[in-house]
Image (cartoon, grey):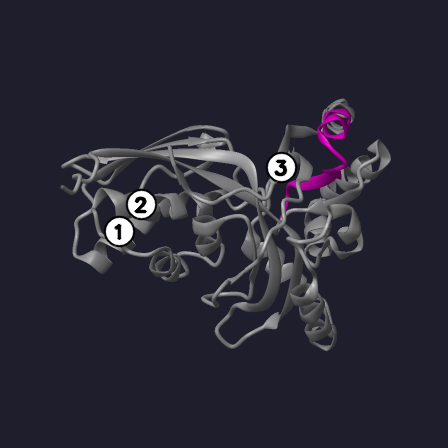
Amino acid sequence: MTSSPPLQITLQVPAKINPQLRVGPPRQDGYHDITLAYQAISLYDILTISQNPHGPTMNVSGMDSDRVPHDQRNLVIKAAALLGAHLGVKPHLHFELVKSIPSEAGLGGGSADAAAALVGCNILWDSKLSADELMTLGAHLGEDVPFFIIGMMAIGLGHKQPLIRLETSGYKWTWVLAVPRRGLSTKAVFQEFDKVSDIEKVYLNRRKECLETPWGTTSPESLLSALVNDLEVPSTKMLPDISLALQLGKTAGAQASLMCGSGSTCAFLARDGDHAKHLKNSIQKEGIFREVVIASGPVEGVKVL
């Protein structure tokens, strides 16, 4: 006897960091060539989806909820509409989103929430699409969305390109994340990046290095020199607080200091949990961040609670 699909479902979805992010020149379609390593980390948004004949409707609470749209502009509702159109189903649903992932912080919160919506609606509608099918749909919403469906570690190759899933061998990365008071627009950061000259000459070598790095099967301490973000320079020009934050991490004894995504969060690699607590306390004392949290990775992607 088969069970009926649930009337309500709750899911958690992690944030991400990019241990390496390499950017090439803009393409004819307006997107950039890009190669990046993904790692899902233990900082979670929670999404509850329930039936609502008057939906889609949405409520957002928690971290930065005042910065997040509660209507059709939100990627959660866009994801439900996309899957519904694919299946021929009307998204008569209510979404209750509780955020812990900061907004406009380079941690992928909006894309993560969209991935949770795809997975949750797939279950509620009993549509039985595979993870790969959901990832293909998710790529239409944003290039980070497919990663959150699988989590752990992967290599991304840009807009609508398939992810390269990476083997992981049990190594734990412990991070302290410090979020400046201001965020950055991804579009604006890329526009600033485009002012950099001759990037095409070095990008192919950088791409090759990212692809050949054993991200999931080597200790973090062995990969410190590989922790690089090509968007750090343009983001720092737009928001000098990032440079200050990265220097604070180094002074506090972080193994590495790295900007997340297109900014503005800064990630500091710790040796272990105790070292992370020390880093967090040292960084919090400066009083320049709106949030400082400890998270570790890699972790799995969207999970039903």
Q: Earlier in the sequence, mark 1 or mark 3?
A: 1
User: In the image, is residue 287 part of the stretch drawn in magenta?
Assistant: no
Q: Looking at the image, is 42 positioned above or below residue 258?
A: above
Instruction: Inspect the image, locate mark 1, and give the three-letter code of the amino acid beneath it.
Output: Ala
Return the residue nearer the eye: 280 or 305. Answer: 305
Helix, strand or loop at label 1? It is helix
Q: Looking at the image, is 136 positioned above or below residue 222?
A: below
Return the residue nearer the eye: 135 or 251. Answer: 135
Q: Which residues are magenta?
A: 263-278
Mark 2 in CB contact with mark 3 (< 8 angstroms): no
Mark 2 in CB contact with mark 1 (< 8 angstroms): yes
Determine the residue positioned at 60% across, 51% down.
Answer: 168
Q: Disc 1 to disc 3, how far (Cα)?
A: 33 Å
Say whether residue 169 is visible.
Answer: yes
Return the residue nearer the eye: 135 or 88. Answer: 135
Residue density around tag 2, few if under 14, some if 14–19, many if 20 or more, within 10 Å: many
Q: Label 2, on which residue?
A: 77
Q: Label 3, on which residue?
A: 296
Determine the residue positioned at 28% across, 56% down.
Answer: 129
Q: Looking at the image, is 68 positioned above or below residue 209?
A: above
In x, y percent, where is residue 128?
A: 25, 53
Q: Label 1, on which residue?
A: 81
Helix, strand or loop at label 2? It is helix
Position of residue 230 in the picture relative to residue 7 (left or right)? right
